Image: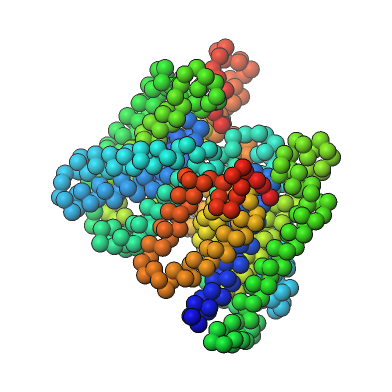
Amino acid sequence: MDVFLQQTFNGLALGAAYAVFAVGFTLLFGVLNVLNLAQGSIFMIGGIVGLELVRLVDLPLPAALVLAMVATGALSVLTQIAVFGPLERRGGNRWMGLVASLALARLFVALAQEIFGTQVLRFPAEAWMETVWTIGNVRIQTLQIIVVVTALTLMAALAVLLRGTQTGRAIRTMAFNPQVAMLVGVPVGRLTLLVYFISGSLAGAAGVQLGILYNAVSPFMGEMILLKGLTVLIVGGLGHVPGAALAGVLLGLTEVYSVGYLSSSFREAIGFGVVFAVLLLRPTGLFGAAVRQRA
Amino acid sequence: MMSFLASYENVIALVLIHSVLGIGAYVMLSVNRFSLATGGLMALGAYVSVLVTINAGLPFPVALAAGTLVAAVAALILGFPVLRLEGDYFALATLAFTEVVRVIALNWESVTGGALGIVSIPIETRMWHLVLTLAVLVGGVLYIRSTFIGRILEACRQDEMPAQAIGIDVARVRLVAFVVSGAICGLAGALSAHYSYFIGPSDFGLIRSIDAIAYAVLGGLGNVIGPVIGAIVYTVLPETLRFSAQARDILVSLTVILVVLFLPKGLLSLGPALYRGLFGGSRGRASVEPEAAE
């Protein structure tokens, strides 16, 4: 039972980070109908920037997290201005966007290797809060709590923004139909940039979170999270924000539980098998409404 | 000339294999489906053919046939349910397929050798095999596109609703295209495995699927020569920057982004523009060709 509780908590911390990543990912799809496969590399840049700010500039962890989010948000806006925006204005074929986003991902990974080197980076020991709380027999690290609290804060902020403000209503109108949004006077251009910013900064936050959980950051961490993000995206329902959050936590728990019980390393294959089954049987995702609902 | 060919033999073989893969991707793009299954199908062709030559000790042509056939059958089985899916969902399902194949190759150690892969594969592929394969494929695609089947394919690409209205079974056309694409990728896998002495799971991941599509998009989808030109540029260009893997990646991905942004019809579209620029304002023959594909 203790082991179970312990693993549940570990899984929740991991799942919280997955959820943050997946929500940014799915928001972009739900609102702007963009499948941005460069999202994994933006996540990676978030992780590296966050770690370097702690390591080289000696910033406290929370400040580094916020700055990393601003940086990746800005980077994401930049990709919109330089690549995705012009592509959409041209109205070219949809897969051109996919090709461009894959090329962007490769570009970012190569640039990160060029600038930060190819080795795995770790947080410096003095920035490390090694405090461990013991409740019953369950050991909880402060860092895990930080990750979970950050995730909850970000989700709550996003929920308030989307559900409770005028801006959120405008964004949801765009998700419903961009033409309609324009007709009723929603500043679509500006809000598009905002959605890119939110999506990028959530990816960056997830990068810092996973960097903290594993205490390891490298230019290659993006591909792993991209595949997991896609899993979550599909299981939660493409473009379905609460679904992505839930599916992210679920994936974290599944991974942690299955370490003990599934000895075979076919585990990943099972994950993709699930994706497959969901796509074929219920393409709107497990938590999606039968009719496609977005954002 | 001969010494030039000898010193660049590897690059040339790589260009040829990549061209074949590019055509495999082109076939799917020409029925308007974004398939990321290329890497997985290629892996099937490679592993099956290698098992045939090494474990079963059968001759090379049998191995090629087996690799091609298994990949084609896999495409058929995969395509049946998956081709029902629209746009992005299809792309993601094929991505999942490629990943499943990679994970299986990584973990089924008794058969695939796991992460270490399979070594000492007999080198059976000769340059003329590759040249012949590419020539047959280019010729075949050009021929098919000149027949009524070509017009059916074009109808499926441009707009499926009218195509269905005039009685084209779009779903079946796409399935056939997927099987053909699978066979091409399988063959490419079998040929490249017997060229390179070693195969491992990392040779056939998602990156393969992405690269294959990049060849086609880079060259241009208006013509089957497009993927070949794309493969040449994509493969030879990085060779000029041998010293740094990162610089290579940066160059290649910037090229792709710039082509996607500014040359949506690929490098092929540079041809006519260059011609007009060099030989003055003559418009050339009057033409009723449909707009070339993006």
Within the image, what quadrant is residue A250 found in?
bottom right
Query: With A144 as the anchor, is A271 left or right in this view?
Result: left
Query: From this viewpoint, which residue is outermost toward the top?
Result: B286
* Total count of labels: 0
Above or below residue B31? Residue A171 is below
Quadrant of the rendered structure where residue B55 is?
Answer: bottom left
Residue B181: % across, % down: 38, 36
Is residue B83 placed above or below B92 in the rendered structure?
Answer: above
The residue lying at 68 percent from left, 72 percent from top is A149
Residue A209 pos. (x, y %): 62, 70
- Residue occupying image coordinates x 73% and y 59%: A158
Q: Is residue A125 visible?
A: no
Place of residue B98 in the rendered image (x, y in percent of width and height, measured from the top left): 42, 50
Left or right: residue B66 versus residue A132 is left
* Residue A126 seen in render: yes
- Residue A47 in picture, x, y percent from top left: 62, 67
* A96 or B215: nearer the viewer: A96
Task: Please name whichever residue, B286 or A5, is drawn nearer the observer in this view of the structure.
Answer: A5
Q: Residue at x 40, y 71 (%)?
A: A261
Q: Quadrant of the N terminus of chain B?
A: top left
Q: How is the image coloured?
A: rainbow
Q: Quadrant of residue B228?
A: top left
For this rendering, which residue is in front, A100 or A39? A39
Residue nearer the viewer, B292 or B100: B100
Screen quadrant of the C terminus of chain B: top right
Left or right relative to A232: residue B3 = left
